[in-house]
Image (cartoon, helix red, strand yellow):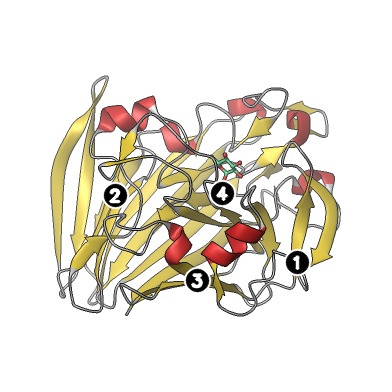
Amino acid sequence: MKLIKRHYGWIEDQEIIEYHLVNNQGAVFKCLNYGAIVTAILVPDKNRSLENVVLGFDRLSDYLAYPSYFGALIGRVAGRIRKGQWLDHQLTLNEGKHHIHGGEPNFSHLVWETKEITNQTDKLGIQFSHHSPAGENGYPGNLIVTVTYFWTNNHTWIMNVEAQTDEQTLFNPTNHTYFNLSGDTKRTIETHQLQMSSEVYAETDDEKYPTGRLLAVEDTVYDFREPTSLRKALNKNPKGYDTPFKLQEGKVVLNEQESGRRLEIKTTRESVVVFSTTGMEEDYFINGKKMCSHLGLALETQELPDAVHHEHFQSIILEPNKPHSSQTSYHFSV
Ligand code: G6D
């Protein structure tokens, strides 16, 4: 295995590095110390052709210019918090009158401290750490966060997240990678199939906030218990998916038959937010393609959004004496 470091740019006097983690089969996982962004994952298709299976820019200036959190680590809290209110804390309002993805600047806009992990037999890693001071984006508690990305010889990206606080606070991070298994975005996500161990989804209102109702997926466009064509699902649900699903077994499978690629996600988290990029007809280019509807599928593992306003959702309160520890792994195969 080999770790290559490439100069990627500067943010003021801080050098931005792209790390290339190359496994012993030549498959490559690339990430930045800026935003802990995953810029590319190159894995083989059924003909052993190595191609990129995530949406990512080639240049730092594009990551700085365009939002949408491509490949980035999101925190302290992923998703929306209604009116940015939690107890008597007022969090930054960065989506109209609401708070989204931890406020601004959040984890996805930071230059993280990094440490290379090269002493393990079957994997390479980059450990990212950050001290988020009390009061940042309105959150109480000095928070120490460590996120480690490992890339293994069997094409698995493992993401471990640890955090501790000195005062009660909120913590519900995610990674916001958009997947497209066709390889170098040759096709859209409509050629993919999605399967999840999810019996219920969180109903959302017009502003994309969970109403609190967890509804059965049976006989709805949210039923992905069997492998389901995204083309068929999106035809039945033209407004697309920006939907939290509660997971029973912490497992999500995405595959694309033409390339033969399969992604299996396993997580210790409560749910996954599926975001189908429906309607994202943008002016910018990503992976050399004009960003358009259904170019990628974000699969954001996390606890259910806006949990602070729904008692029956898993709590995202982090207590000083109880550190957070979670894991999501993404295994690519053919
Ligand atoms: C998340 O759920 C949200 C979307 O609504 C948002 O547009 C995207 O992040 C950038 O997936």
Alpha carbon separation for disc pair 1 and 3: 16 Å
Would you say the residues marked 4 and 3 are in contact, meaning their CB atoms lie under 8 Å apart? Answer: no
Please give the name of the residue rendered at 35% of the width and 49% of the height, measured from the top-left corner: 55
Q: Secondary structure at mark 3?
A: strand
| Residue 321 vs residue 262, the one in the foreground | 262
**Residue labelled with disc 1:** 220
Give the mark nearer the N terminus: 4 vs 2: 2
Alpha carbon separation for disc pair 2 and 1: 37 Å
Q: Which mark is residue 193?
A: 3
Under 8 Å from ligand 1: the CB of mark 1? Answer: no
The three-letter code of the residue at mark 3 reads Gln
Q: For this view, does 203 lie left or right of residue 291? A: right
Alpha carbon separation for disc pair 1 and 4: 28 Å
Give the mark nearer the N terminus: 3 vs 2: 2
Please give the name of the residue rendered at 82% of the width and 61% of the height, measured from the top-left corner: 214
Q: For this view, does 321 lie left or right of residue 124? A: right
Q: Position of residue 324 (x, y in %)?
A: 59, 57
| Residue 21 vs residue 232, the one in the foreground | 232
**Residue labelled with disc 4:** 173
Give the mark nearer the N terminus: 1 vs 3: 3
Q: Is residue 300 visible to us here?
A: yes
